[in-house]
């Protein structure tokens, strides 16, 4: 069915197609509920335990068949990430995690450091997820063909990794490449990164409404010769934005493309999507 997918595909549509591949799966997601997928167990990870419990209660009403479990996780603190990962590893009744969706993120318009001394956006959007993923890897490898899905952004194309000033979007993509290469052939782990599209969330709203930032991005794109993007916004609905999450997490047709960057429910074509070389390099990933 995936050959019919595209920009306007909705999450509900992909769920209907992939329902047999979703049921009974254990899904851990940071920063987004994805309860409508109908997995066997949905582990909700986030900074606020009361908010997580509130979300779980709402899901119990809308999707009573879906079991949920909250997990307090602050990705901006490596100490808390370690503590949260230890909690997951101590769950004797959760022997495996089939899918990990690394979605939570912030937009650090103002410079700030985490308690560990790292720039807060890079720490939250990449370092925290990187550490958490590796610390619960035993639970992932206990599943058959587990998947790690890193939610990135088309904004990666604004710059490659600068080793003195890291760029977090590209890091998400390179992490997926490295996981696929290191743990795919022998351990069966699949990993993907994706761009969900431009969806009006707290993150994008903050960027668009912040005076001057949109023009800075457009100017940067021009300097870099990226004529394909940021001319204007073709907004997606939340349903359309979530579709590629579901596709990355469960579609069996992309298993042979582990490590790939996904856009609009398909593997990004390096010609039509103009995927930058700095985001596909195994050397950079290493």
Image: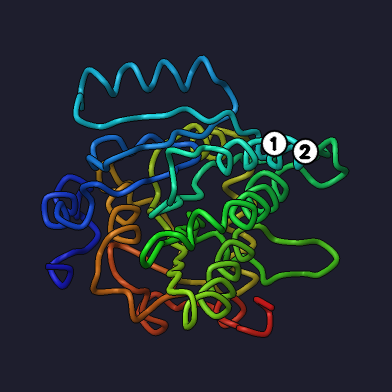
Examine the rendered structure and indicate whether residue 251 appears above or below residue 35.
below
Examine the rendered structure and indicate whether residue 259 appears above or below residue 116.
below
Residue located beneath label 1 in the image: 83
Q: State whether residue 47 appears in this view.
A: yes
- Secondary structure at badge 1 equals helix
Residue located beneath label 2 in the image: 79
How many discs appear?
2
Apparent side of residue 151 relative to residue 3 in the rendered image (left or right):
right
Give the image location of residue 285, x and y in percent: 65, 76
Mark 2 neighbour class, 10 Å CA radius: few under 14, some 14 to 19, many 20 or more: some
- Secondary structure at badge 2 equals helix
Apparent side of residue 255 relative to residue 65 in the rendered image (left or right):
right
Examine the rendered structure and indicate whether residue 87 appears above or below residue 58.
below
Residue in view at x 38 percent, y 54 percent:
98
Which of pointers 1 and 2 indicates the residue nearer the eye? Answer: 1
Question: Which numbered disc covers residue 187?
Answer: none
Give the image location of residue 160, x and y in percent: 67, 72
Residue in view at x 60 percent, y 55 percent:
217
- How far is mark 1 from mark 2, CA to CA? 6 Å
Name the foreground residue: 9 vs 220.
9
Residue in view at x 33 percent, y 38 percent:
41
- Farthest-out residue, front: 92
Examine the rendered structure and indicate whether residue 244 appears above or below residue 268.
above
């Amino acid at each position: 069915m995936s050959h019919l997918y595209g920009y306007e595909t909705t999450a509900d549509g992909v769920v209907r197609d992939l329902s047999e591949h979703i049921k009974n799966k254990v899904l851990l997601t940071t920063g987004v509920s994805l309860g409508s997928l109908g997995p066997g167990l949905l582990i909700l990870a986030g900074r606020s335990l009361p908010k997580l419990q509130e979300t779980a209660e709402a899901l119990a009403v809308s999707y009573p068949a879906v079991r949920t479990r909250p997990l307090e996780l602050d990705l901006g603190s490596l100490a808390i990430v370690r503590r949260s990962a230890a909690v997951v590893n101590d769950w004797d009744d959760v022997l495996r995690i089939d899918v990990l969706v690394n979605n939570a993120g912030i937009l650090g318009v103002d410079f700030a450091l985490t308690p560990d001394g790292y720039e807060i956006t890079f720490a939250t959007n990449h370092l925290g997820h990187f550490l958490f993923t590796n610390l619960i890897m035993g639970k992932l490898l206990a599943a058959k063909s587990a998947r790690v899905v890193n939610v990135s952004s088309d904004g990666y194309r604004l710059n490659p990794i600068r080793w003195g000033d890291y760029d977090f979007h590209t890091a998400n993509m390179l992490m997926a490449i490295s996981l696929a290469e290191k743990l795919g052939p022998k351990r069966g782990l699949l990993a993907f990164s994706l761009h969900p599209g431009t969806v009006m969330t707290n993150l994008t709203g903050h960027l668009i409404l912040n005076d001057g930032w949109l023009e800075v991005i457009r100017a940067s794109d021009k300097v870099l010769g990226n004529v394909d993007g940021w001319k204007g916004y073709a907004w997606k609905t939340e349903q359309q934005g979530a579709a590629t999450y579901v596709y990355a997490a469960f579609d069996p047709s992309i298993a042979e493309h582990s490590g790939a960057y996904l856009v609009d429910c398909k593997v990004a074509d390096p010609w039509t999507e103009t995927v930058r070389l700095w985001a596909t390099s195994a050397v950079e990933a290493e």
